[in-house]
Image: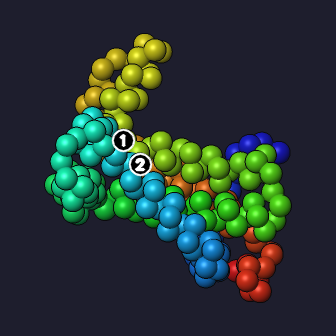
Amino acid sequence: MSIARGLRLPTTRGDWRLMGRTVRLVLTLPVYAAVAVVAAVVSLTVFVVSLNVPLVLDLVIGGSLPLASRLRVLAELYPFIGTSFNPAQGTLLLVVAVLTGVDIGLVAYHFREHGLDLQQGGAGVAGVVLGTLGAGCAACGSAVLLGLLSLLGVSTSLLFLPLDGLEFALLALVVLTLSIYWLAEGMRGGEINGCPVDI
């Protein structure tokens, strides 16, 4: 069997319903809901801090400002609180952070409840890693990718991406969605919290 034939994509309404049902069933368990929320907040924090490392180091961590001012500077880095992101960027960043949290919650559930190892649950882990890397630098992703690809001789034309680096967050969105689908597909036929996972 070829790799393309073995690779399933969510193309039908039933696939999307399976994803939604699996996510809902896993996140009704308080421990995995907490894991998902914490992972989403941490990933959003990593995203916004990674875009402003010098500011965070100079003002928030090493500055002489009072604590309240440091926290205000940090809060201003987040979408819809500060002015660092336009509405489209902020929405996309929040969606990717939420999907990262959901993916990590599903991965944690799958590993703990089904006793999987890293080799068997690699799609979920890969989705989280690639999603985090792609979204973590939505605004400067083109510059980071240019640095990596320049080693292979790719020119600076990569800096002129039509969406100013949002392509990487969109790619993260696709990778995370696929990861969630593959995790849900892997749980098909089982039970979560006493409910069958099958559509």
Q: Secondary structure at mark 2?
A: helix
Give percent across and percent down for residue 150: 41, 17
Determine whether, in the image, residue 117 is placed left or right of residue 72.
right
| Residue 163 visible, this angle | no
Label 1 crowd bin: few (<14), some (14–19), many (20+), radius 10 Å: some
Give percent across and percent down for residue 132: 49, 47
Name the residue: 77% across, 86% down.
194
Q: Which mark is residue 18?
A: none
Q: Nearer the viewer, residue 31 or 197?
A: 31
Image quadrant holding the C terminus, namely: bottom right
Residue type marked 1: Ser
Rendering quarter of residue 95: bottom left
Write down the residue under mark 1. 50
Rendering quarter of residue 129: top right
Image marks 2 and 1: residues in contact by CB distance under 8 Å? yes
Q: Is residue 4 above or below residue 160?
A: below
Residue type marked 2: Val
Q: Nearer the viewer, residue 30 or 165?
A: 30
Give percent across and percent down for residue 178: 58, 56
Q: Nearer the viewer, residue 78 or 174?
A: 78
Image quadrant holding the N terminus, namely: top right
Q: Nearer the viewer, residue 197 or 121?
A: 121
Rendering quarter of residue 2: top right
Write down the residue under mark 2. 46
Name the residue: 35% across, 56% down.
93
